[in-house]
Image (spheres, coloured by chain):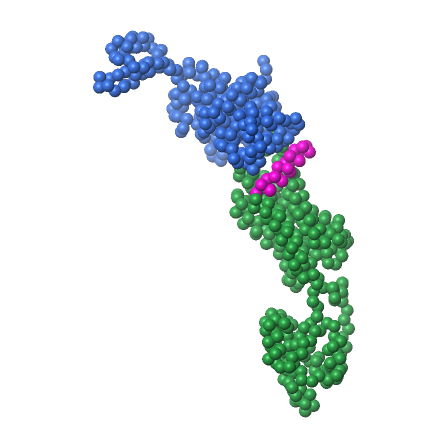
Chain colours: A green, B blue
């Protein structure tokens, strides 16, 4: 295959891609929308614990403790009704109501009743934590020390005060979406060429089948890569480990190009391409859910090729991971890209005959 | 003796249990316009696909310009031009862009798209997108695309089917010009009149086999019957048509009797058409 052939085919595909107004619009809009969405998401995480308190009179030691606690923001209320109204309004997730005669009851040796009010979206596992917090409060009110001393040791990077912002958690998902939009456009382009018979016309020239796939692969990979790299550039994702991230994007772009070949081998028109494409997009987006909802990660997600792209980006963007840390990820991602490209080429070739 | 441009020997192709091409053999001389005629489903397009390297025959051999097509399809495809039966152009590109794309695939560096578009009657429309072309214009562009590499052998699959007379004539003119340039033309059609006008030799294909192959003139002499068609005025004032075979011993007497005894309105002779001959040989028409 000559350079003249390659450039002619790439230029043809580029024109063909943007001749489809739907994908031209979606390509531009998705880049703008995803970049905008990134900047609309919070760039920091509020790590303070907000709670409401109804407590008639607090001992001076408790007042001092409460005013010095950086990580706890306490709002005082005069009545239980006021506290409940604040929680219902969404101002606070939780509030404690101590009885007015708390001190008297404690001195008399009776067991005072403390009420815990919770917003409906407080996770169940947090309820017991708040119950423990109430008990700690009582120790402070009584002016007693806790019977134990707790030592905290963080294994791995200490994220206290440096929690990963929602926009940073979201960024790998946005990258996967941008790559998949390009993939759908390429699949639609190929499917329309097969249906129109133009592929047949190309193949009765000196152009070989291998050359045709090479050109499609180059166009699809570079186009998807350029879009994703632009997104990372605009969102500051290339500030750290640029080479590593660009290589991950290139491997990811090759991977989705293979997926595009597979979609084009079963899609007959725009609707069927979209149907298969959305299915593929959902599958490839699954690994990003484990970033958005920590604790959701399951081992089987490692079977999904995009896991290795998502994990690489997440670690380089948020934990300053280097070649040593994500090198295996890159190798697996490249292997997946090669497998998907080969599979896609083999299945798509059958439609050309 | 020069090597024939096309040699096909005992070509066979099946689609499952359907035998589409059954042991066909023929040769096409360099510079010849060769008509490949037959009804739909006779095996014409399958044969063209094999000769142009799009399908591998299940048995048999074929060479184009002395090159084994099955072994070196790309070497062959570099020297041929193919105009497909169904329009397969890049509709969102302009006519000129379509031609430039294929010129670059053939490695043609200095390519004048305007000159080629002018040849097929599309001058001034090169910058228009193909999706805005009429059917005739698209077909002319298809022919132009087949010419971008100045092919030594030109395969045209039903190039004038369903076209207006102007477009059809433009394509026939290009075919004659290509022959004059020295190209061999392999014309697949079921338009017998067109084949008669253009082709040096024709092959009749029926159910995957060649049932006759010769020049149109020889086929007409061998299988056709010349006729005299006469219109006479009947006593009731209506026109009646009479047919008299021209080459029989009693033909002069029969014609003389008609002229003397009846009021002749029109009288003309006609030779058999290729379609008449095809029906005579195969027992069925081209539309079947």
Image location (x, y in percent) of residue A144: 75, 83
Q: Quadrant of residue B263?
A: top left
Image location (x, y in percent) of residue A351: 55, 39
| Residue B130 vertical position relative to residue A329 in the rendered view, above or below | above
| Residue B225 vertical position relative to residue A303 in the rendered view, above or below | above
Q: Quadrant of residue B255?
A: top left
Q: Quadrant of residue A120?
A: bottom right
Outermost residue toward the bottom in this view: A108
Relative depth, front residue between A186 and B100:
B100
**Left or right of B256, for residue B80:** right
Image location (x, y in percent) of residue B110: 66, 26
Q: Residue at x 77, y 77 (%)?
A: A149
Q: Residue at x 64, y 50 (%)?
A: A31
Q: Is residue A143 visible?
A: yes
Quarter of the figure with the N terminus of chain A: top right
User: What is the number of callouts on the image?
Assistant: 0
Residue B196 within the segment the image draws in magenta: no
Which contiguous range is marked in magenta? A1-20
Relative depth, front residue between B43 and B85:
B85
The secondary structure that most of the magenta stretch takes on is helix
Residue A15 within the segment the image draws in magenta: yes
Relative depth, front residue between B99 and A144:
B99
Q: Residue at x 66, y 41 (%)?
A: A218
Quarter of the figure with the C terminus of chain A: top right
Image location (x, y in percent) of residue A345: 61, 41
Outermost residue toward the left in this view: B236
| Residue B212 vertical position relative to residue A349 in the rendered view, above or below | above
Q: Is residue B59 visible?
A: no
Q: Residue at x 67, y 86 (%)?
A: A102
Outermost residue toward the front in this view: B124
């Amino acid at each position: 295959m000559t350079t003249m052939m390659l450039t002619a085919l790439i230029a043809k595909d580029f024109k063909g891609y943007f001749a489809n107004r739907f994908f031209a619009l979606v390509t531009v809009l998705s880049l703008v929308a995803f970049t905008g969405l990134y900047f609309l998401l919070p760039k920091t995480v509020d790590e303070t614990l907000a709670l409401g308190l109804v407590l008639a009179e607090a001992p001076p030691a408790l007042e001092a403790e409460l005013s010095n606690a950086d990580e706890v923001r306490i709002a005082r209320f005069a009545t239980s009704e006021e506290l409940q109204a604040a929680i219902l309004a969404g101002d606070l997730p939780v509030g404690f109501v101590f009885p007015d005669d708390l001190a008297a009851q404690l001195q008399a040796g009776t067991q005072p009743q403390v009420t815990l009010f919770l917003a409906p979206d407080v996770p169940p596992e947090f309820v017991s934590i708040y119950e423990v917090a109430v008990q700690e409060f009582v120790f402070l009110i009584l002016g007693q020390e806790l019977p134990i001393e707790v030592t905290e040791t963080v294994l791995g990077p200490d994220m206290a005060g440096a929690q990963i912002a929602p926009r940073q958690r979201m960024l790998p998902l946005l990258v996967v979406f941008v790559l998949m939009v390009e993939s759908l456009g390429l699949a639609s382009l190929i499917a329309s060429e097969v249906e129109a018979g133009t592929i047949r016309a190309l193949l009765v020239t000196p152009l070989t089948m291998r050359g045709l796939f090479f050109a499609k692969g180059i166009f699809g990979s570079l186009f998807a890569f350029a879009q994703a790299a632009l997104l990372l550039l605009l969102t500051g994702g290339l500030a750290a480990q640029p080479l590593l991230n660009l290589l991950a994007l290139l491997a990811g772009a090759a991977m989705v190009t293979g997926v595009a070949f597979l979609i084009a081998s079963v899609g007959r028109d725009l609707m069927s391409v979209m149907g298969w494409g959305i299915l593929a997009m959902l599958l490839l987006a699954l690994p990003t859910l484990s970033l958005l909802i920590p604790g959701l990660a399951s081992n089987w997600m490692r079977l999904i090729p995009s896991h290795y792209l998502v994990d690489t980006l997440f670690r380089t963007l948020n934990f300053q991971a280097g070649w040593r840390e994500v090198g295996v990820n890159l190798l697996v991602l490249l292997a997946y890209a090669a497998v998907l490209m080969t599979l896609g080429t083999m299945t798509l070739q059958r439609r050309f005959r | 003796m020069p090597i024939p441009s096309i040699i096909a020997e005992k070509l066979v192709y099946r689609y499952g249990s359907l035998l589409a091409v059954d042991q066909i053999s023929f040769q096409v001389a360099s510079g010849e316009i060769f008509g490949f005629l037959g009804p739909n489903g006779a095996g014409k397009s399958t044969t063209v696909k094999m000769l142009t390297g799009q399908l591998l025959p299940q048995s048999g051999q074929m060479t184009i310009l002395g090159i084994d097509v099955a072994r070196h399809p790309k070497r062959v495809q570099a020297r041929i031009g193919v105009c497909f039966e169904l329009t397969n152009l890049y509709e969102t590109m302009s006519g000129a862009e379509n031609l430039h794309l294929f010129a670059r695939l053939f490695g043609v560096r200095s390519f004048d798209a305007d000159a080629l578009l002018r040849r097929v009657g599309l001058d001034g429309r090169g910058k228009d997108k193909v999706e805005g072309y009429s059917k005739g214009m698209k077909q002319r562009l298809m022919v132009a695309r087949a010419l971008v590499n100045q092919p030594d052998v030109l395969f045209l699959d039903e190039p004038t089917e369903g076209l207006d007379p102007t477009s059809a004539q433009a394509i026939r003119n290009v075919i004659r010009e290509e022959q004059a340039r020295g190209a061999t033309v392999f014309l697949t059609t079921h338009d017998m009149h067109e084949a008669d006008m253009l082709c040096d030799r024709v092959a009749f294909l029926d159910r995957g086999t060649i049932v006759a192959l010769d020049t149109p003139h020889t086929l007409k002499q061998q299988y056709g019957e010349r006729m005299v068609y006469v219109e006479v005025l009947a006593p009731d004032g209506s026109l009646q048509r009479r047919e008299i075979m021209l080459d029989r011993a009693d033909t002069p007497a029969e014609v003389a009797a008609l002229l003397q005894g009846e009021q002749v309105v029109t009288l003309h002779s006609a030779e058999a058409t290729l379609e008449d001959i095809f029906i005579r040989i195969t027992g069925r028409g081209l539309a079947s």
